Image (spheres, helix red, strand yellow):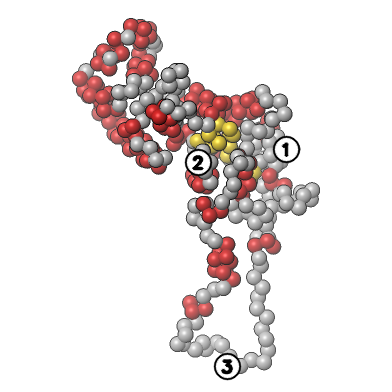
Amino acid sequence: GVAELSGLAANHHVFQKIKNSSEPFAEIFNNWKKLPEANVSELWDILGKIDRFDVRDDVGQKIKEDVKVAAETAAKKGLDLKNLTAAESVSGEEALTMEDLDCLNSGKPLPVYDAFILYGEEDEIVSEIVANLEAQGLKILIKDRDLLGGTFEHAAVMKLISSRCTKLVPLFSPSFFSSEYNTFLANFAQHLSLESPGKMTAKIIPIVSDQRCDIPPNLGMYSKLKYDPNNTLFNFWERLVRTINPSVKYNPMNAPNTVPPAQKDSQVLKPDKSASTPNNVKSASTPKSSSKTVKSKEVPTKQEFSNIAFNGTSSSEPSSLESEVTGDSGALLLPD
């Protein structure tokens, strides 16, 4: 069968584990994927040799899609998927991410990430958060993009959060708390923080979405940062970057789709006159002369209005950053 053709049967100890396992193929795959010469093409050929064309028909399209996604993800990280062969270190520590594979191939220690981003299935803003943080040089980890296939996700994520990620950044939203898995991981990270006296809030940095949600009391104790990239009181991205890693200096020019402030203000305060009144056409509504001076309508600056209420205790910190009593997001939206 697969064990013989993959060469695993030659190892008596491994072969006995496969025979005694309640899920033989899962045990085969778990051992076979650690071999340097193992690849999807070889597995595809083995399935054909044992006449399991039914399996090939069922999973063929999914395998192609997974390989394509893996190749694209590796390319974005500057890695070549064909060179990511080793899956286990000499000490027996297993690779969990693509960066792990690259480090094991080059003999480097496994990387440590600045933050693990935890989010709900419907939280689309996570892509913007990851893009802005990585643009500043932070090493960010998200399970749907970075976790290697074939690993036991639950154990791999707990391993990464506990020993390979400096911070856990959960995105609090209704979608987040609808997942028991997310709640468990947040509680797990809190347990890790409690094991370090004096650093109870150092591990978790919650971001609260603009959707009101019920935050459990044990997670409501943390100071929360409201997701508001357009905040005029402070630079949201700079504060988030410095909170995750104070040693990283924020550079606004590295931010994706950045519009220079001077250019942005000129676009707001200096509208194009040619768009409303052509040069060669005299406006019929404009009088030839007027003795009265018409006072131009004042354009409010960005600092005059805000959708964040102050708590009266600080001139720079909005009260929406934390709400320890009610356990909700603390976001207070004022009418326009």
Q: Is residue 160 above or below residue 145?
A: above
Query: Which label's residue is closer to the chain start, 1 or 3?
Result: 3
Q: CA distance from mark 1 to mark 3?
A: 64 Å
Q: Residues within 10 Å of mark 1 (few under 14, many from 20)?
A: some
User: Is 193 situated left or right of 132 in this image?
Assistant: right
Circles 2 and 3 in contact, beta carbons < 8 Å? no
Of residue 234 and residue 295, the one placed in the foreground of this image is: 234
Amino acid marked by disc 1: Glu
User: Is 174 situated left or right of 99 in this image?
Assistant: right
Query: Which label's residue is closer to the chain start, 2 or 3?
Result: 2
Q: Is residue 13 above or below residue 162?
A: above
**Residue 335: percent from left, percent from top:** 67, 57
Q: CA distance from mark 2 to mark 3?
A: 59 Å
Quadrant position of residue 5: top left
**Residue 162: percent from left, percent from top:** 57, 26
Q: Is residue 310 above or below residue 49?
A: below
Q: Which residue has dot 1 on it?
A: 324
Quadrant position of residue 216: top right
Q: Residues within 10 Å of mark 3 (few under 14, many from 20)?
A: few
Could you tell me if residue 154 is visible in this image?
no
User: Is 112 situated left or right of 331 in this image?
Assistant: left
Disc assigned to residue 288: 3
Tell me the mark number nearer the camera, choosing from 2 and 1. 1
Q: Which residue has dot 2 on it?
A: 122
Q: CA distance from mark 2 to mark 1?
A: 25 Å
